[in-house]
Amino acid sequence: MKTLKLRIKDKHAKVLIQLASEANFVWNYCNELSYKHLQRTGKFFSAFDLAAYTKGASKSGLSLHSQTIQAITEELVTRRRQFKKAKLNWRVSNPKSSKYSLGWIPFKARGIICKNGQVKYAGQWFGLWDSYGLSKYKVRCGSFNQDSRGRWYVNLVVDTPEPATTTEGKTPIGIDLGLKDFATLSNGQKIKAQRTYRKYEQKLGIAQRANQKQRVKSIHAKIKNIRSDFLHKLSRQLVNDHAAIFVGNVNAKGLAKTKLAKSVLDAGWTAFRTMLKYKCDHAGVWFFEVNEAYTTQTCSCCGSRDSSPKGRAGLGIREWTCQGCGTTHDRDVNAAKNILAAGHCRLAVGISAV
């Protein structure tokens, strides 16, 4: 399976906003109903229980497809379990509110028809830019989604044939993630960090001080799109070129609480690892996150940890020479080689990383 994202033409925005408002109404109704039931009985509603209260809603004034109402209740129950909350956040339909919820209209396969560069939902046809050729795919489920600029997209989860891939002749690779260089590979290649947020930080600040809310949303969306494009292209290239990928389990969440927070969040390490994982799974490529502790300080040639100079854990020392074997190391390349070696050990013994 894979997800296709296609842009809906702007002329349909008004209709989609109205449908999204109805979806928010169903979410809020089920959310409140489930919470009150929990207060009375001490038990949570399941999606099956909620279906009894929403049955026939699509014929009683709502324009939503019945499959959408069912998908909303299932999503509500799933998120409540995921976040371990008795009551989830209210979805706000007023675009002037600071807590406005971006439009979201989920559906199942029976709720949508794709034909001739259009999708039919709730009796209405929506034009889109069909760059994939939707007619050749079987849709499983999906949703209409609004971005921060007010643009609408349809995201479709479709079945795809099993790829006829082979890893013969391809080499494994170790990846050390960083801030100056986004990724350093065990073969010595370095991929420079994009620093997308830093490039647009000044423009963003000007728009914020001028209270230009739409301009701020547009800049944020542009930063997100540029970052996502970079991560997708890089992850695809790595998956296509290598038989196994091992990446260090750098703690992005922890570093986001330090003075490096802006740079860490701008890098997008977590999103990159997520992309690598699902693309590797689809392509039949080995993927592991390995413990990167001491990978910078350990010599990748002789394995000695005590032969590196003092202060090597800090970022000030970029190169160092092992006192044991005399090999000179670039700190990031050395770390990537150690990550590769740790990944090989995991494949050999078949145990999870500590």
Image: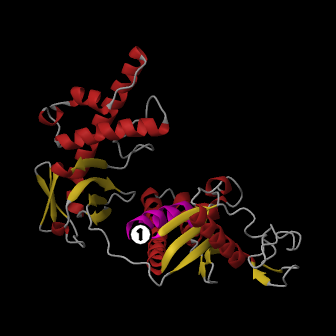
Membership of 162 in magenta stretch: no
Q: Which residue is mark 1?
A: 284
Residue in front for this viewpoint, 88 or 111:
111
Left or right of 18 in this view: 238: right
Q: Quadrant of the N terminus?
A: bottom left
Membership of 281 in magenta stretch: yes
Residue in front for this viewpoint, 51 or 24:
51
Residue in front for this viewpoint, 20 or 189:
189
Q: Is residue 332 above or below residue 115?
A: below
Residue visible at 15% across and 67% down in the picture: 135
Secondary-structure class at tag 1: loop
Q: Which residues are magenta?
A: 267-285
Q: Is residue 142 above or below residue 33?
A: below
Q: Position of residue 261 (x, y in %)?
A: 65, 58
* Residue type at tag 1: Gly
Left or right of 293 in this view: 40: left
Residue in front for this viewpoint, 273 or 316:
273
Residue visible at 27% across and 30% down in the picture: 48
Q: Position of residue 196 (x, y in %)?
A: 54, 71
Q: Quadrant of the C terminus?
A: bottom right
Q: Position of residue 158 (x, y in %)?
A: 26, 61
Q: Is residue 320 above or below residue 115?
A: below
Left or right of 116 in this view: 83: right
Residue visible at 24% across and 62% down in the picture: 10
Secondary structure mostly seen in magenta is helix
Any part of residue 69 in sight:
yes
Left or right of 332 in this view: 108: left
